[in-house]
Image (cartoon, rainbow, N blue to C red):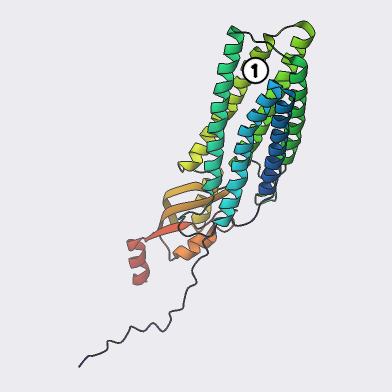
Amino acid sequence: MSTQVPEPSHPHATSVPELPHDFGQGQKRRAEQRATLVTLLTLVTMIGEVFAGLITGSMALLADGIHMAGHAMALGLAALAYYLSRKHAHDRRLSLGSGKIADLAAYTSALLLGVSTVWLVYESVHRLLNPAELMPREALVVAVIGLAVNLLSAWLLAGKHEHRHAHGEEDHHHDSNLSAALVHVVADALTSVAAIAGLAAAWLWGWNWLDPVIALVAAVVILRWSWGLLRQTAGVLLDREGPDEIRRAARKLLQKNGDTDVVDLHIWSVGQGSWTLVAAVVAHGTSTPEEYRSSLNSIKNLHHPIIEVSYCRQCALARKSH
């Protein structure tokens, strides 16, 4: 004969709903639309230049069209990252959300920019040591078209970001993915301006050597931008500690009742303008982990904070004795 063991009863137990797996990446951003539009604009220009180069036999047009293909790939990567971040925002296989997809795309984009600039340095030095025939008028047309497209693309990408601070100000410092796309466009615009100056000098005065020299100067500037973007995105991918102002705000809120000591605190980015934290506190009162989490609600764009609470034993014994 089998006996059935009764399940323990919990008269006060209630079903607690599972927290949504959302780290602020589920909404479609205007930046995604901008990146997609600029990608399409770059692709159309690239196809037009390649066809024009093949029809007219202009190597300058063909070379610029191939050059724009690299930027189209980087811009397309930015647009794809926004889409994938949004699509997988609630995918629980991604423990801390999908936000770092965009940072990974930005890091890859910075690498592509750096590699293309190294190629530009090599080609410029080669042209200085081995001067080649230059067609300044045709190349000027290409440079002016490229500059116009890049200025339009930069204007489209440079719109305001959607993240806001507590007082409503726009936050322009956290979207690495959009920054990477913008750096590509601005870098291309800079090379177009440099090319126009060098080609104009070659056309007017025959200074063919000035074209590769200006390209070298532009390459150095672009390499600095690329290096800065690599450092920024690598820090996010490696879970670098978050901004000091968020750390100070979190510590102040956790200790606001005067009966808590924060013994450990880590804050890091989980996406574009989104943060999470893990804290260990020693409570001298009776505050619960949920109360500590609720105290952090005033910090904008902070998602899923984890609070480990240790209760002071002497404090508990003192309360019992009274």
Up-down relation of residue 313 to residue 219 (above or below): below
| Residue positioned 49% across, 37% down in the render | 234
Residue ID at (67%, 41%): 39
In front here: 258 or 153? Answer: 153
Give the image location of residue 277, x and y in percent. Answer: 48, 52
Q: In which quarter of the image is residue 105?
A: top right
Going by the picture, which residue comes out furthest to the right? 204
Q: Is residue 283 visible?
A: no
- Tell me if residue 92 comes above or below residue 223 in the rendering: below
Return the residue nearer the eye: 288 or 297. 297
- Left or right of residue 238, residue 141 in this image: right
Q: Position of residue 125 (x, y in %)?
A: 58, 12
Q: In which quarter of the image is residue 6?
A: bottom left
Q: Residue at x 50, y 42 (%)?
A: 236
The residue where tag 1 is placed is: 215
The residue lying toward the viewer, choosing from 41 and 22, is 41
Dot 1: few (<14), some (14–19), or many (≥20) neighbours within 10 Å? many
Q: Is residue 76 left or right of residue 51?
A: left
Q: What residue type is labelled 1?
A: Ala
Q: Where is residue 97 in the image (x, y as percent from the top left)?
A: 51, 54
Q: Is residue 232 visible?
A: yes
